Image: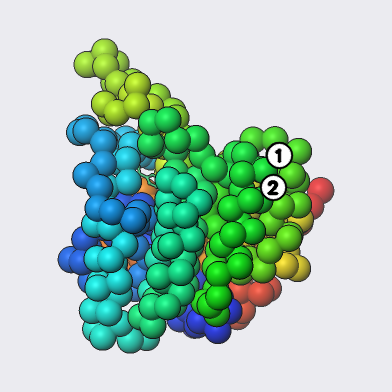
Amino acid sequence: MTFTAQIGNVVFQDIIYNSSGPRCTTLEELRALGESESSAIMMKSCSPEPRDGNPEPRYKEVELGSINSIGLANHGYKKYIEYAAELKEQFPEKPVVVSIVGFCPEDFVNLVTAFQNEPNVDVLEVNLSCPNVVGKPQIAYDFETSDELLAKIFQIPGDKPIGLKLPPYFDPVHTAMMAEVLKKYPISFITCINSVGNTLIIDPEAEAPLIAPKWWLGGLGGDYVKPVALANVRMFYKLLWDRMMIIGCGGIKSWVDVFEHLLAGASLVQLGTVLGKEDTACFARIQQEFYEYMEKKWYTDAKQIIGQLKEL
Ligand code: DHB
């Protein structure tokens, strides 16, 4: 049994793939995703120019998750266009998804334009929620700025599906305000959630924070954030289910987490922290566990589960 999914005309042979997060920056890492059971190859968020990112230490794993402040280390969008060509040749069946960031509206416009014209890229995820660049607030926490940026992005010609990577919201009033903005544009999907930004993990032995950049604050992922992710998936599903797909991301490390994200309203899910911890073997493991449970419960189609949370 497999559950397929479709974003626009792009077919995903399964519903589990990687997030724009760990292990998707270099061509070698992207090839490993192609070879794995990941149902797509998602690339690390790329910027107009290559970036070294923040000083080390900048990524740490702990029992309940991970903390990162990579600071957008990436090879620059032109390299990811080259990588997309190589990946398409080697893995023609796998959707190639790019993640786009910018430091001003023109950056986003230029990169969306470039990728819309790139035949080896299938789907665009516009990242409105990077928490790790000093002095650059997360765009999607500012509804007016987001609206203005989306107006520019959705004027660009092109037929590739565009989605947004959103930060977690912590108040349903804010979720509803963002949903009102999103309704104005032909957005194919939203990915909920990016890491919970600007958190502090302390190593009590060392009496020190785990990471160095940005006053030692970083984006939190893993078990810690699953309830936040589920709340965001659910609230946006309730508000937008008839307009765009929700992609669940946050705290998924086993079949039960996939199942919960689908019940909340996700149509596909992304793996981040667990990919960092286990490497690409996590895709086959989680898929197998998930399908065993589906068979046990006689589910044959993801549509029987998506959004079907039994509300009290
Ligand atoms: C980085 C972290 C993010 O959460 C994100 O969305 C983009 C970039 C980073 O630190 O590299």
Tell me if residue 50 can be seen.
Answer: yes
* Image quadrant where residue 16 sits: bottom left
Q: Residue furthest right?
A: 312
Q: 311 or 164: nearer the eye?
A: 164
Residue at 47% x, 78% y: name it.
12
Secondary structure beneath label 1: helix
At horizontal 38% and vertical 36% (from top left) the residue drawn is 133
Give the spatial CA distance, label 2 vs label 1. Answer: 6 Å
Residue 153, image x, y percentages: 56, 62
Residue depicted at 61% across the width and 66% down the height:
154
**Residue located at (68% from left, 73% from top):** 304
Q: Quadrant of ligand 1?
A: top left
How far across and how far down the image is residue 293, in percent? 52, 68
| Label 1 environment density (alpha carbons within 10 Å; few <14, some 14–19, many ≥20) | some
| Residue lying at the far top of the rendered structure | 207
Q: Are marks 2 and 1 in contact (CB under 8 Å)?
A: yes
Compared with 21, 202 (above or below) is above
Along the line of sight, the residue nearer the viewer: 216 or 180? 180
Q: Position of residue 8 (x, y in %)?
A: 58, 79
User: In the drawing, what numbered circle is on residue 174?
Assistant: 1
Does 305 appear above or below 159?
above
To which residue does mark 2 refer?
178
